[in-house]
Image (cartoon, grey):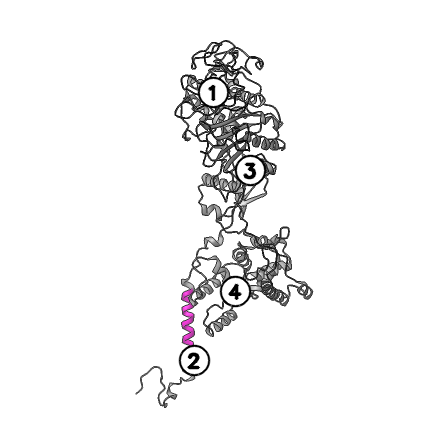
């Protein structure tokens, strides 16, 4: 007796007929197969969860803007993508993409059975598994979600199909199409529709919101193979082979739109390939703007704690304080003289930095870090160099706070016996020289003597009050501290001088970020904490320092700045070792803007002397640095936002009735404080007190020591070496100012 449940092989049949199943068996086998497939699919459907979005797929480029809202650049490292809302996408583009990639998009459930069958047949009849049959939803799943991948395997395709069905149930067709348009690769280094429009079409015709039929059909066509269809070469010529391929795909898209009734027969006949922009690789870090982007990136990271990935791929819009016109003026001033700027023409390996801030707010309005960030990543606007005599105003402020006045007198002869400090060219000015005249002519011995008397720690405290960090390399409480041997940046010096311009008050730190928002949430604005202000000096002290710095411009080493055409107060600075000039500065301000400029060569240890064409000429702060500063400040002072509205405050004459001497109601006459002739030795005819002695309480008068016929009006002194006495500068054939 046959006890088999299934009669197979079939009993009572001869070989090989017994192996042929009955129709009932075939039907049963088919039903079992369908049940297994459905069961497996149901299990897989439940088991496969929608994964997290791939970070690269949702990353949007973070863009940076000038203070007026104009585009400055974008950070490298993130995807070139800016998401768009489907409501802003023109219907002609939607229809073109659907015609190209999934003509049943609005009818299918995320997958296309016909497409899958067609792909299966193709794959079974060839060695390749490359036939896709993917809908727009499947392509979106493949590009958007983690761990889906693009491997050409059946397992991956099954998972992709299941996810497509799930996504189709969870999202509307409009949402799927929007995410698809924002996710796919369009070629020319662009992800998403907005980036694609800007990459493919000429400026003025590349707004995604107003794409034409021709442009829309072309963009839809290139989705399949962007590089294959890019027929426009960078040199302006056309690749005929690629153009033919693009035309074929373009015609396919147009035919589909016509078949769907989305365009008329006339529109289809008139459609043609659009004009393309020449391909280019825009690197926003090229040139001078690269330093701005790098600095903004660093400041944003410091203020928020965000990672590089968050900043570069977060789709942020950063509105900076940087003024587009002021920056253009800075770049122009730093161009070589042959190109209309003030930078020396023969300046091999010479570097310069510029930083400029609004004195009342601390907002950074311009920064020049170098000519090309891609070639050199050292930002000379924030890179530290010894500022030389541009530190002396801080010593003056310290003395005024300690009870001195502008007319307190100190040792002006060279050398200063107690420290062996020398003046430029070994020049002597007399044994009783006022702080005012000492700053005007930048006399080393006067300010080292003053630092000894009040104590170097008080000078260091004034420098720190101006915003220079206490741990700045080289900032030591030694008698030579006024001579500027610490490493500070132009930005730090501009901030420090802003306190003098703003009645003794400065911003706690320079500000470069105005506000930040995400492109997808423009109303969620993040603003940095309100800029805090610090009272660095008393207002009267700041007024007197400003008065002295104004004298530097009108009568001293900074006369080049008279060309600004506005109220100006400034100081030169030169740092050197023996006969070599290692850095040269010009730092100053108007009532509205403070700016610092510095120059150095190589790694900062090469001599600047002779740069500019005259091999016998010393490189002083009053030369090229002052010329750059003046050209920039003249341009900025003509801008309505920064044009000075008034003059500097009047002379306060702090302590003129006290320790520093009698009241002074007017500027000292030229015969007293403005022009003494140097003495031939420290023992001049005028009484010579000890260099560290306190000045006399009576009204000071500049001495008239016996002249030295072998010397002319001296130039600005070199900086004293940190470890001891300064070496006098090389003799020059004529007077030079720093």
**Quadrant the N terminus occupies:** bottom left
- For mark 2, what is the residue? 27
Q: From the image, state whether disc 1 or disc 2 is nearer to you.
A: 1
Q: Nearer the viewer, mark 1 or mark 4?
A: 1
Q: Which residue is mark 4?
A: 135
Q: Of the two numbered discs 1 and 3 on the same chain, state the one appearing first in sequence.
A: 3
Q: Nearer the viewer, residue 624 or 214?
A: 624
Residues under labels 2 and 4: Cα distance?
33 Å
Q: Is residue 284 magenta?
A: no
Magenta span of residues: 28-44
Left/right placement of residue 208 relative to residue 124 reads: right
State yes or no: residue 39 in magenta: yes
Q: Which residue is mark 1?
A: 426
Q: Which comes before the other along the chain, label 1 or label 4?
A: 4
Determine the image quadrant of residue 236: bottom right
The reply to whether the C-beta atoms of the residues labelled 1 and 2 are less than 8 Å apart is: no
Cα gap from disc 2 to disc 3, whole angstroms: 78 Å
Query: Is residue 507 visible in this depiction of the protein?
Result: no
């Amino acid at each position: 007796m046959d006890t088999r449940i299934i009669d197979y092989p079939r009993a009572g049949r001869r070989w090989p007929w017994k192996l042929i199943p009955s129709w009932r068996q075939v039907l049963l086998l088919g039903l079992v197969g369908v049940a297994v497939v459905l069961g497996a699919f149901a299990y897989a459907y439940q088991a496969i969860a929608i994964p997290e979005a791939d970070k690269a797929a949702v990353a949007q480029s973070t863009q940076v803007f000038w203070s007026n809202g104009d585009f400055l650049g974008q950070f490298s490292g993130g995807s070139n993508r800016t998401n768009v809302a489907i409501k802003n996408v023109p219907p002609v583009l939607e229809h073109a993409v659907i015609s190209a990639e999934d003509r049943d998009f609005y009818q299918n459930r995320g997958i296309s059975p016909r497409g899958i069958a067609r792909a299966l047949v193709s794959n079974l009849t060839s060695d390749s598994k490359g036939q896709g049959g993917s809908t727009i939803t499947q392509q979106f799943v493949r590009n958007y979600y983690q761990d889906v991948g693009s491997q050409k395997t059946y397992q991956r395709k099954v998972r992709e199909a299941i996810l497509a069905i799930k996504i189709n149930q969870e999202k509307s067709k409009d949402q799927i199409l929007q995410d698809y348009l924002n996710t796919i690769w369009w070629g020319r280094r662009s992800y998403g529709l907005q980036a694609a429009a800007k990459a493919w079409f000429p400026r003025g015709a590349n707004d995604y919101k107003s794409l034409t039929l021709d442009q829309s059909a072309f963009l839809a066509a290139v989705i399949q193979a962007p590089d294959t269809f890019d027929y426009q070469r960078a040199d302006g010529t056309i690749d005929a082979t690629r153009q033919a391929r693009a035309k074929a795909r373009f015609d396919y898209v147009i035919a589909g739109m016509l078949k769907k009734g989305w365009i008329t027969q006339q529109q289809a006949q008139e459609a043609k390939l659009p004009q393309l922009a020449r391909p280019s690789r825009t690197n926003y870090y090229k040139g001078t703007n690269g330093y701005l982007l790098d600095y903004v990136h660093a400041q944003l990271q410091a203020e928020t704690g965000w990672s590089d990935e968050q900043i570069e791929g977060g789709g942020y819009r950063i509105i900076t304080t940087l003024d587009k016109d002021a920056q253009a003026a800075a770049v122009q001033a730093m161009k070589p003289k042959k190109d209309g700027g003030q930078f020396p023409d023969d300046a091999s390996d010479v570097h310069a930095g510029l930083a400029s801030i609004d004195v009342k707010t601390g907002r950074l309005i311009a920064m020049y870090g170098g000519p090309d960030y891609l070639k050199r990543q050292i930002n000379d606007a924030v890179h530290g160099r010894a500022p030389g005599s541009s530190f002396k105003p801080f010593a003056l402020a310290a003395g005024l706070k300690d009870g001195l006045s502008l007319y307190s007198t100190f040792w002006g002869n060279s050398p200063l016996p107690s420290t062996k400090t020398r003046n430029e060219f070994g020049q002597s000015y007399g044994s009783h020289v006022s702080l005012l005249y000492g700053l005007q002519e930048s006399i080393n011995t006067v300010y080292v003597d003053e630092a000894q008397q009040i104590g170097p720690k008080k000078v260091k405290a004034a420098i720190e009050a101006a915003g220079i960090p206490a741990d700045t390399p080289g900032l030591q409480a030694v008698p030579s501290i006024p001579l500027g041997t610490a490493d500070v940046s132009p930005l730090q010096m501009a901030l420090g001088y802003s306190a003098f311009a703003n009645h003794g008050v400065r911003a706690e730190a320079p500000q470069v970020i105005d506000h930040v928002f995400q492109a997808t949430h423009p109303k969620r604005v993040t603003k940095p904490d309100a800029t805090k202000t610090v009272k660095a000096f008393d207002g009267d002290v700041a007024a007197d320092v400003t008065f002295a710095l104004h004298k530097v411009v009108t009568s001293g080493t900074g006369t080049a700045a008279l060309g600004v055409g506005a109220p100006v107060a400034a100081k030169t600075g030169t740092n050197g070792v023996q006969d070599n000039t290692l850095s040269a500065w010009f730092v100053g301000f108007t009532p509205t803007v403070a700016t610092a400029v510095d120059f150095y060569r190589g790694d900062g240890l090469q001599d600047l002397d002779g740069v500019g064409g005259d091999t016998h000429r010393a490189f002083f702060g009053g030369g090229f640095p002052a010329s750059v500063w003046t050209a920039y400040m003249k341009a900025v002072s003509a801008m309505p936002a920064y044009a000075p509205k008034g003059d500097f405050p009047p002379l306060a004459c702090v302590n003129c009735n006290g320790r520093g001497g009698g009241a002074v109601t007017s500027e000292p006459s030229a015969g007293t404080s403005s022009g003494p002739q140097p003495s031939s030795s420290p023992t001049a005819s005028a009484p010579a007190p000890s260099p560290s002695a306190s000045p006399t309480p009576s009204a000071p008068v500049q001495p008239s020591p016996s002249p030295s016929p072998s010397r002319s009006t001296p130039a600005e002194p070199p900086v004293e070496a940190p470890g001891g006495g300064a070496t006098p500068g090389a003799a020059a054939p004529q007077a030079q100012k720093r």
